[in-house]
Image (spheres, grey):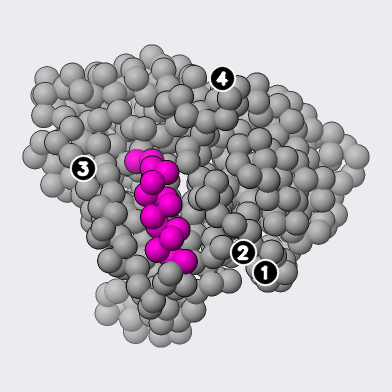
């Protein structure tokens, strides 16, 4: 913080934790290119496909019926029942009484932090990761301990399980895990989940699991006939375990702008979640919840077809990146992103800005996800027109002088 800011009235009254927050490096790059028709934007974590018509029509019909009033803090009972039924097709049934509907997945994560974390608490986070996850406990005054995934020679990231267990002690209030991971595409294995759950039971540490990308995985695992699904802590945990699992409608149902998520909670936390929802947003809009009901109703037809399209995009982009000299890129196991390294790139923010300014290619800088991602770039490959990926590869090749 500069001297002028520190001496200003705003600088004087801000909490230090808030004054120290960094702005989004992804937004910094995007702001340099938004509005330019010649830029191919792959910087944000969303598909360029619009929300399915059935979802939009359900929300529109809700508005036509005049459903413009408050709902229950925890969400419409029928939506909570639909989420519980959807979850039960993939994992042991949680029951609607353990579901809390939130105004976005990021809101669910923040409410989980507000329930569990206070000033001076320790939170261990697996990184690199979407920056909101580590900023939230810092905003609440917690100390965030970062445990890094490591890339191999091909660029595939993996977990040092022993290092993570060593970092999580009886002092650790929360272990924060995002898997499938944004930005690396890493997926937590079942044996790793079991080891972490057993360890956190012993240390009395809460696990907050961001499993937003669980359906967007590119192997044959998952319940028969339901399409791929990443391993979930819900498959191993009891209802009383110290576990909060966070989900979102954004990625799996192409609903990023709708801002709707949910949590699966232990019964002991449900009332507290309702109170915090009241003090944060009161409730999610009813018409958005009606759209979510429609999304869940068509999930078993829609989601496998979406993942098949995303797999084709992943394969196309990964092959193109691997063919470029000086680029290290392994196909991600899950998620929407290719995370790759360019030889000689040691300032990913500057490089991402130059790609926008000089070549019309919009990517996210790896440093946006923490210092562990410096030197890397994130490319969202969720495109309804895969040819856009080809043009992006041509622009990257020109930037590399090829």
Q: Secondary structure at mark 3?
A: strand
Q: Which residues are magenta?
A: 186-201
Of circles 2 and 3, the one toward us is 2
Residue drawn at x 46%, y 24% as measured from the top left: 220
Residue at the disc numbered 3:
151
- Say if 336 sits above or below 395 in the image: below
Q: Secondary structure at mark 4?
A: helix
The answer to whether residue 333 shows anywhere in this view is yes
The circle drawn on residue 305 is 4
Q: Is there a contact, CB below 8 Å, between mark 4 and mark 3?
A: no
Q: What number of labels is visible?
A: 4
Asked which quadrant contains residue 132, the reply is bottom left
Residue at the disc numbered 1:
268
113 vs 378, nearest the viewer: 113
Q: Is residue 193 magenta?
A: yes
Of circles 4 and 2, the one toward us is 2
Residue drawn at x 13%, y 41% as measured from the top left: 345
The circle drawn on residue 214 is none
Q: Residues within 10 Å of mark 2 (few under 14, many from 20)?
A: few
Task: State which tag comes first along the sequence, 1 or 2.
Answer: 2
Q: Is there a contact, CB below 8 Å, between mark 1 and mark 2?
A: yes
Task: State which tag comes first along the sequence, 4 or 3.
Answer: 3
- Say if 161 sits above or below 279 in the image: above
Q: Residues within 10 Å of mark 4 (few under 14, many from 20)?
A: few
The circle drawn on residue 240 is 2
């Amino acid at each position: 913080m500069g001297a002028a800011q520190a001496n200003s009235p705003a600088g004087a009254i801000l909490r230090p934790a808030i004054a120290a927050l960094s702005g989004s490096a992804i937004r910094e790059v995007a702001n340099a290119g938004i509005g330019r028709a010649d830029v191919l934007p792959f910087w944000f974590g969303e598909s360029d496909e619009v929300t399915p018509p059935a979802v939009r029509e359900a929300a529109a019909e809700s508005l036509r019926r005049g459903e413009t009033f408050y709902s229950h803090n925890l969400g419409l009972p029928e939506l909570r029942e639909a989420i519980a039924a959807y979850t039960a097709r993939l994992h042991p049934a949680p029951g609607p009484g353990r579901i809390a509907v939130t105004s976005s997945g990021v809101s669910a994560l923040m409410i989980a932090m507000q329930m569990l974390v206070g000033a001076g608490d320790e939170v261990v986070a697996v990184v690199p990761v979407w920056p909101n996850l580590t900023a939230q406990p810092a905003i609440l005054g917690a100390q965030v301990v970062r445990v890094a995934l490591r890339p191999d020679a091909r660029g595939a990231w993996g977990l040092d399980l022993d290092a993570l267990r060593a970092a999580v002690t009886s002092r650790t209030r929360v272990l924060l895990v995002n898997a499938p991971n944004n930005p690396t595409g890493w997926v937590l294995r079942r044996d790793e989940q079991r080891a972490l759950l057993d360890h956190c039971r012993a240390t009395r540490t809460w696990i907050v699991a961001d499993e937003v990308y669980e359906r967007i995985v590119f192997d044959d695992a998952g319940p028969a006939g339901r399409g791929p699904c990443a391993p979930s802590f819900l498959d191993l945990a009891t209802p009383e375990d110290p576990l909060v699992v966070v989900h979102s409608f954004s990625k799996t149902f192409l609903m990023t702008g709708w801002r709707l998520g949910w949590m699966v909670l232990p019964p002991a936390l449900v009332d507290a979640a309702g109170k915090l929802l009241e003090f944060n947003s009161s409730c999610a809009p009813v018409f958005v919840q009606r759209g979510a009901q429609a999304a869940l109703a068509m999930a078993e037809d829609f989601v496998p077809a979406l993942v098949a399209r995303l797999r084709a995009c992943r394969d196309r982009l990964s092959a193109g990146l691997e063919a470029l000299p000086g680029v290290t890129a392994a196909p991600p196991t899950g998620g929407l992103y290719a995370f790759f390294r360019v030889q000689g790139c040691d300032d990913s923010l500057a490089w991402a800005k130059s790609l926008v300014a000089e070549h019309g290619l919009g990517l996210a800088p790896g440093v946006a996800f923490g210092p562990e991602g410096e030197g890397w770039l994130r490319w969202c490959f969720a495109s309804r027109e895969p040819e856009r990926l080809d043009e992006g590869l041509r622009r990257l090749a020109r930037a590399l002088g090829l």
